[in-house]
Amino acid sequence: LVNGSDFFLLLRAKELGLGEVAIVMVYVLYNLIYTLVAYPMGALSDRLGFRKVYVSGLIVFGLVYGLMATQVSITVLILLFAIYGIFTAANDAVCKAWLSKHLLADTQATGMGLYLTLNSLAFLVATAGTGFLWSLVGSAMAFSVVALLSLAAVLYFVFVPIPKTESVFVAKPVTLILEFLITFLPLIELIPTAGPLETIVTLVFSTVTLNP
């Protein structure tokens, strides 16, 4: 919910004095570092565990945003874009691999689809929220808030225990969501087109609960 569009990093870099050509070059540098580090990060997560590598990536993310909230030099700014590539490598593929370890074989596609859906919604919220803060209190404060929220995420992963089980049935959260929808369907029925919606949700709910 705090990792929005990378476009904010480019806008902030322009504020801090990078020219248009230099901005393109540092973004190329970021992608290059991500490409080079993605495989080693995957191998490292296999040895140390997904959680440690993922949390390390969050720390790097918070560090980059926190420092870019200040008036850093051009040299430091370029270095931060390179470091940001490490965060992406430690977050993207590692997160998906970590999730797959907690899904049963016959729910892999459903679980990954649900994750990507929620991740896209979170990205939308994070991007809109960062943009709103930027326009309201300025870029420096917006970056500071993002850095603090990422620190909160780090503390969550450090202190909140994760279940040891390697398989979590993904249909359970789907069932809960559908139960929530069915609970509020009487309100939706006030809308003339609610009939088909109720039928669809009820059928899907029956399928999920009867075929776990």
Image (tube, rainbow, N blue to C red):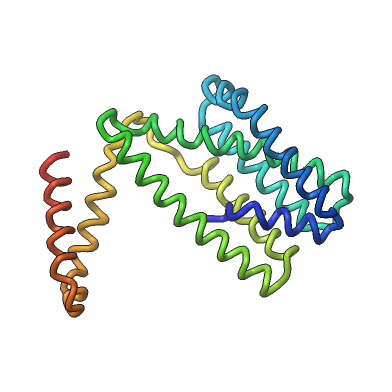
* Count of picture labels: 0
Reply above or below: 128 against 74: below
Name the spot of residue 69 as percent of width and height, x first.
76, 58
Give the residue drawn at x 75%, y 63%: 140
Give the residue drawn at x 67%, y 48%: 62
Name the spot of residue 111 as percent of width and height, x first.
33, 40
Q: Nearer the viewer, residue 7 or 114?
A: 7
Reply above or below: 43 against 87: above
Q: Nearer the viewer, residue 35 or 123?
A: 35
Residue 170: name its quadrant. top left
Q: Nearer the viewer, residue 165 or 119?
A: 119
Residue 194: name its quadrant. bottom left
Name the spot of residue 169 as percent of width and height, x first.
27, 38
Reply above or below: 91 against 43: below
Name the spot of residue 129 as percent of width and height, x first.
57, 65
Give the residue drawn at x 24%, y 53%: 176
Residue 143: name its quadrant. bottom right
Give the residue drawn at x 71%, y 54%: 9
Q: Image check: 12 left or right of 122?
A: right
